[in-house]
Image (cartoon, rainbow, N blue to C red):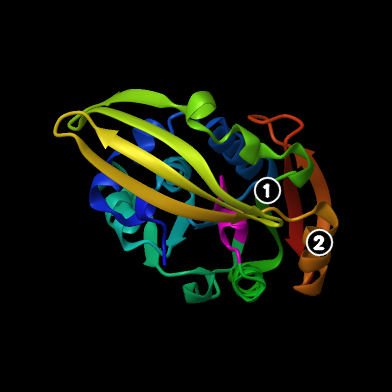
Amino acid sequence: MPDAHYEHPRLVGVYDALEADRADLGAYAAIADELGARRVLDIGCGTGVLAVALAAGGREVTGVDPAAGSIAYARQRPGGERVRWVHGDAAAVPDLAADLAVMTGNVAQAVVEPADWAITLRGAHRALRPGGHLVFETRDPARRAWEEWTRERSYRSVEVPGAGVVEAWPEVVAVDPPLVTFRSTYVFAVDGTVLTSDSTLRFRERPEVEADLAAHGFTLDEVRDAPDRPGREFVFLAHRTA
């Protein structure tokens, strides 16, 4: 089941404004340019910001997401008609002979169960052409990012067009490595509505990710630093071996 902030219409409507600091998306667009990717699959595309931006550059883009609310929002955003939207997980994507598949933000970590992670990697492999690239990010567990997920350190208040002022903050519920569960709270000042969304992320060690890639037909090319969180994340670049 998708987390509420990807599914609930009111939360989906304010998601982009609350997550406006997405410097990582520019980095993914730059990687698409670097690789000369013309056909791109965005796994866990969310509200479609990156997919639409890539399609605006003339690329053939497919966005897939298990949250119907996010897909519905992505379809109606300006430029959304240029993208092929698929409601489902990576298993729902056919063979696209894509040059590049990406998973941005929390997408890879939000695939918590090993069986589901295997399905995701198999789906990406199937969707790519031989030699096509898979690029995604995941936090370095050693940096213990969840220690910053408190109201005191992560509170924000944003004026959202059409929704008014929205306050938001996360609070960790449980730490059971490699899993971390947290609750995001949203307060809508216009009517006092309070909504929450619970999320669980899996913090995979780098050797685990490298082994998983090899087991599912990928060759690791490089592990880069994340430009928006230097020293805190791994960015994996791999290609489909065959």
Q: Is residue 197 left or right of residue 143?
A: left
**Does the magenta-highlighted stretch encompass residue 102?**
yes
In this rendering, is residue 176 above or below 115?
Answer: above
Q: Farthest residue in the left direction?
A: 191
For the residue marked with disc 1, what is the amino acid?
Thr
Tag 1's secondary structure? Answer: strand
When asked about the image quadrant of residue 226, the answer is top right
Q: CA distance from mark 2 to mark 1?
A: 12 Å
Q: Is residue 46 visible?
A: no
Q: Nearer the viewer, residue 196 or 43?
A: 196
Q: Identify the mark nearer the N-term, 2 or 1.
A: 1
Give the image location of residue 225, x and y in percent: 76, 36
Q: Which residues are magenta?
A: 99-112
Crowd rating for badge 1 (residues with CA inside 10 Å; few <14, some 14–19, many 20+): many
The residue sitting at 75% across, 60% down in the picture is 239
Q: Is residue 89 left or right of residue 120?
A: left
Pointer 2 residue: 208
The residue sitting at 73% across, 35% down in the picture is 232
Pointer 1 residue: 138
In this rendering, is residue 98 above or below 16?
Answer: below
For the residue marked with disc 2, what is the amino acid?
Glu
When asked about the image quadrant of residue 166, the answer is top left
Give the image location of residue 146, x and y in percent: 62, 40
Tag 2's secondary structure? Answer: helix
